[in-house]
Amino acid sequence: MLSLYLPILVILLAAAGLATIIFTLGVVLGPKNPTAEKALPYESGSPSTGARNVRLSIKFYLTAILFVIFDIEAVFLYPWAALFRRLGWMGLVEMTLFLTVLVITLVYAWKKGALEWEK
């Protein structure tokens, strides 16, 4: 079983090692001449007016969390679809229950007004 995952482990270690080497070389060999102008915030070529005192609505964060949850849950559909025939009826029942929980959650969020941007 370990021999199946060994190539993946080698690739991950090689990628981490290469990233570490490149980052270290950039820090060690890169130019170091910070100026006051370089330390200023940069926003698409124009001076940043900033939004330090602007408070975002909790709706923004709630919508983002709901998006992440439903996006991640949708990922579980792909392996299930790939193994649909091998999983048989039990796999169909389990996925139906899973999707039912997702629909109930979506209806609950909708009824609570979590998907309304303005009220």
Image: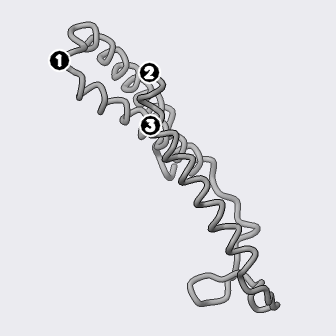
Judged left or right of residue 31, residue 68 is left
Judged left or right of residue 107, residue 30 is right
Residue sticking out furthest to the top = 90
- Label located before the other in sequence (3 or 2): 2
The residue that label 1 is drawn on is 85
Choose between 52 and 32: the one closer to the eye: 32
Quarter of the view holding residue 79: top left
Q: Secondary structure at mark 1?
A: helix
Q: Of the residues shown, which amino acid type is indicated by label 1? A: Arg
Badge 1 density bin: few <14, some 14–19, many ≥20, Cα 10 Å? few
Q: Secondary structure at mark 3?
A: helix
The residue that label 2 is drawn on is 1
Residue sticking out furthest to the left = 85
Give the label on residue 72, or none. Answer: 3
Q: Which residue: 29% across, 16% down?
A: 96
Label count reads 3
Quarter of the figure with the N terminus: top left
- Please tell me whether residue 89 is drawn above or below residue 105 in the rendered image: above
